[in-house]
Amino acid sequence: MRRLREKKKELAAVGYNCWLEYQKQENNMLIHEYAELCRNIVICEDSDIIKNALDELRKGIRMLLNIKPLVSAEPKIKSYLLIGTFAENNRVGSFLEADEKEKIGDEGFIIKLINTNEDRILVIAGKSPKGVLYGVFDFIRAIQTQREQSSILRIENPVNQLRILNHWDNIDGSIERGYAGESIFFKNNKIIKRLDRIRDYARILASIGINGVVINNVNVHKYETNLITSTYLPDVSRLADLFREYGIKLYLSINYASPMQIGKLTTADPLDDNVREWWDKKIEEIYKYIPDFGGFLVKADSEHRPGPFTYGRNHADGANMLARPLNKHGGIVIWRCFVYNCMQDWRDYSIDRAKAAYDNFMPLDGDFDSNVLLQIKNGPMDFQVREPVSPLFGGLQKTNQAMEFQITQEYTGQQKHLCYLVPMWKEILEFDTYAKGKNTLVKNIISGSAFNNKYGGIAGVANIGDNPNWTGLQLAQSNLYGFGRLAWNPDLTVEQITDEWIRMTYSNNEIVVDVISEMLLSSWRIYENYTSPLGIGWMVNPNHHYGPNVDGYEYDKWGTYHRADLKGIGVDRTVKTGTGYIGQYHKEVAEMYEKVETCPEELLLFFHHIPYTYRLQSGETLIQYIYNTHFKGVEQVIELKNKWLGLKGMIGEELFKHVSERLDGQIEHSKEWRDVINTYFFRKTGIKDQLGRTIY
Amino acid sequence: MRRLREKKKELAAVGYNCWLEYQKQENNMLIHEYAELCRNIVICEDSDIIKNALDELRKGIRMLLNIKPLVSAEPKIKSYLLIGTFAENNRVGSFLEADEKEKIGDEGFIIKLINTNEDRILVIAGKSPKGVLYGVFDFIRAIQTQREQSSILRIENPVNQLRILNHWDNIDGSIERGYAGESIFFKNNKIIKRLDRIRDYARILASIGINGVVINNVNVHKYETNLITSTYLPDVSRLADLFREYGIKLYLSINYASPMQIGKLTTADPLDDNVREWWDKKIEEIYKYIPDFGGFLVKADSEHRPGPFTYGRNHADGANMLARPLNKHGGIVIWRCFVYNCMQDWRDYSIDRAKAAYDNFMPLDGDFDSNVLLQIKNGPMDFQVREPVSPLFGGLQKTNQAMEFQITQEYTGQQKHLCYLVPMWKEILEFDTYAKGKNTLVKNIISGSAFNNKYGGIAGVANIGDNPNWTGLQLAQSNLYGFGRLAWNPDLTVEQITDEWIRMTYSNNEIVVDVISEMLLSSWRIYENYTSPLGIGWMVNPNHHYGPNVDGYEYDKWGTYHRADLKGIGVDRTVKTGTGYIGQYHKEVAEMYEKVETCPEELLLFFHHIPYTYRLQSGETLIQYIYNTHFKGVEQVIELKNKWLGLKGMIGEELFKHVSERLDGQIEHSKEWRDVINTYFFRKTGIKDQLGRTIY
């Protein structure tokens, strides 16, 4: 017992509890008031989820307020917390108005304070147990962040139906693009038996409203293909059971060629009767193990994965074949749009990978079944530090859509560099597509509201592994937190999310909040400053994607080029003289991108080939801008480090040291970026830095 | 039995027998004369090596001449072959003159035709059984290549004592820089049990006079470290037994840190008494298993391998510690000079990797024990398609030296491209170092004759694996053959070696000989044409080193840069303005390299940074030369293919197809080289091709 407590303390010190580190709050008036409400928890129902909600609430109250609350079916004192689902005739229901109940959706909750003559009651209620769980986590967050009591009162429903994490975990325990250790689900081609850590993970996800997990990599290799067979399904169902207790549905990535690889069929043609029958039976079998199975995530005809193209069928044929049998059970198909020619000839300037997803999927708008979602990466390329929004958002109208963000920092420093992505995601969600005229924002399209789609949502590629702090760089937990919060409510401001995370994770000390907030909010731009400029992307080492290599992908087959010569750089994607990619946007957006003068400068090189002597709005030439931002970026990282050092004593020692060390590494590596990029362009242009700084 | 014969036929068809494919010779007068001599083999002695020599002779005669020779201790007919070692009082000795015997060294042989009144005797004799074996192979070669009988008569001694192959085989079966399958020695961390293939290999090596093999990689990893322990020594000794029967000694690469990794010592300091004692005992142990063990090959303090530097000792300390106990048993230490800083900062123009070997080893000249050889790569960098000769040759005078050539085509097309390296090696061997004034050729230094060194020789990094044709590209067998022949006698002309190989491998058809000879002799220059120009090297993809990537190593830590900017390219290694590398050569050579005007043009960019507009002797500008050679290179590969196609019907069908396919691949890949390099330099310089050919 003592060993367990020691172990827990050790883990807490490195950040294992993330933002659920319930530190005892200082005893101010607000905390005193919370305490008064929390001495008695009244609860009259019992279910796995409600049990977890109650446990969480007790734990939160005990640790945050230093109170051991009395739990009872009837109120024991006049001031109490009442939690549970509401119904016509139950106690919880009797405290809510009819219009309140109406406003609460399947996953929503209400937190309501009732003062009667005699009693003071705080109701945390949901239509479903899941709603109650979310309400409890929100209430705890209110205490953690010392929200005024009046402002904790609310009705909340998640804006997006699907709030899902994609884990690129392989069954051998490795994680594709994982930077925080090995998988917490798999090891040695088996599902991990000890569920403690996975349970802790489910709890963390529930606290930010995640309601779905795909546990295996979208690249489904040999062994993973068998996850949908009786070899693995008993163990998969144990995971599903566990996640269910936290309101999270389990999904699987499947191999499109399963009928051939698992079944003994000679084809995986989606219009072949035997294939359809095979999938019908397979799906029946899965639901016997997991009655609320979420559905399939499918990467087909992409980067050498099999798909319907093999049989001359289109992606609607492929997706609908799976969707129909899944629909009987309430399951869905999430179909990825990351389809492009990955064997491109770099010599051919007419092909443009950016156009591929739109070209492949727009003609199919309206052809997908109602339980199919297309999962679309935020940009047309692949999670670069800066990309325009994919034109499929606003293009597709009769198709359910989900946004795919990459929480794991593949191209943004691999959790060795600090790069807080929430500001980027927020910018993307607020982007105006003009699909139905002004104000057709991406966030309204993916929520389903803009075009009345049945399903919608956000998927994030997880950034966690079995590192004791989950994310490698502990600060990278903020990306997971922010992802969940934005998925729940994209209207939240970046500042609010950031503020919450810091207060919950570290403390309410205003210096800590201010300093870390500054660090996080500036970090994306800093990373951009010392890496690839103005939206061009891809100046990385091939394969592992870490570190600078300007020509790394320039003469390769992946469709990712900068086309730099001695005079200029950038890809002409205009309609008039370029690849025509810009024509995939709606008129207002297309016009803005088409002209160099109106194109947002941060995307200038994505859309245009620009001479180095071109003057930006700042008055700098393009080449001088490259030099300036790269010198500045390194200085900014040094500043980040100095800011962090100022927090000594205000952050736990281990965490303090850990982040300091990572920032040291970032300083060194940002210098490498600066020097390689500056030297590359100096050698190419012969133009000197106006300020005479060292370029090698 | 029939299955075995079928199998042998199949293997023969793909080239398994290499140049020992004894095809029946056409029945001309010469062959008739040979036949007359070969009906009776007289032999009076018995040993493993002699037995193998006899077997080979019988096989060769049977297959080449279609005769089943009678073997007897006494002549049975008047015309016969007499083979064996000569001694004062034996039959063989009685046919040799005293001065002949004197001229024959330990490994040498004599072939002598004696016509008496009654008898016609061809004597093939050696001082040792090994000499007899070499004589037999030479005699067979004479028949295969239809050498006139008069010109087969000779006394031959190998010029180099050490004619050794380095196998970069790992014990898991992989081969570092292997392009012909897996190891024939190792599999799954064990030594392979079935020795058939290894025996065939030993025979092939003996036929070209190889007398040593290092069976494991110079990078000695975890398991390989244990090759010198009782875990592996019994199996190693079985290999040694096998090789011994073909006159080949077995050597092992060792891990310098063995006393720590195998023994339980806390240091590997060469001056530590415990360490010395540990090695003494270890070496005793090895010789118990292998009484004629060759010795150790050591890569120390190189590319992260451990070495004496760790303990503040120098390489003489390290090598001599091993040499002393080995010396008791006649063993030697082969110490590699491939020592440089592989963590260089590309920004630092003052460091020059080319200087490293000389800087590290010259100060130690004379400090090494007499049974230590320094093994020096031919050039100062690492087996690029064109490099100057290492200045250690001619620098070192009081130290035994061995040349290290790379037969495996790491940087020269990886046995997917045809690149016949014998002309390159010959050029290097004939290079005049001026160490003792004019005519101090490299070949005379490494043979030991120039400075009267006790040991000398040539090592080659093997290009073979378990591919049925041994070398991946069957034509690459020519490199192994040529290596062995040059190691035996560096005075042989390239043309003679090439001619021999073709005749032995394919046929004496003059068209075949002419065409393949042209192909081989032009292939090195062709490969150079479409890859990196004028000695600059390194324009390859990092790690695997296949395919073009001009900046692949430009911003890396390996010390391998081209320093190209918009105005010029090349590394200034002059004494006057550059890194000073040229100063490592003797005066006459240094003066030649120092001046742009006298520097051989094929090495221009290795030694100088040159503007693209510089005019070469041909009148072309440097940039136009780059374009011209790259366009030409591709055309030349197409020509290679056409030449080969002209041999249809004259080459076995399978081989013909195999080579055709490889040449197709080479055409495609040479285009990739051409286009990447041309585009890179066009983008960098903005200078157009004068002939207006397509640059992308």
Image (cartoon, coloured by chain):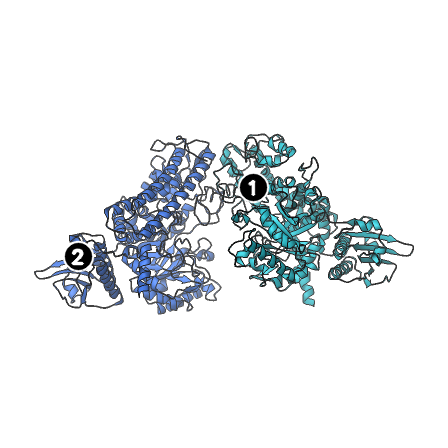
Chain colours: A cyan, B blue
Marked residue chain, label 2:
B
Indicate the position of residue B47 as horizontal and vertical percent values: 25, 68
Can you tell which mark lies on residue A356? 1
Observer-nearest residue: B532 or B12?
B12
Kind of residue at badge 1: Ala
Observer-nearest residue: B658 or A258?
A258
Observer-nearest residue: A293 or A410?
A293
Residue depicted at x 27% and y 67%: B48
User: Quadrant of the rendered structure where residue B21 is?
Assistant: bottom left
Q: Give the secondary structure at mark 1.
A: helix
Can you tell which mark lies on residue B34? 2
Marked residue chain, label 1:
A
Q: Callout 1: few (<14), some (14-19), or many (20+) C-alpha neighbours within 10 Å? A: some
- Report the side of B61 relative to A404 (left or right): left
Q: Give the secondary structure at mark 2.
A: helix
Answer whether residue A80 is visible to the viewer in this image: yes
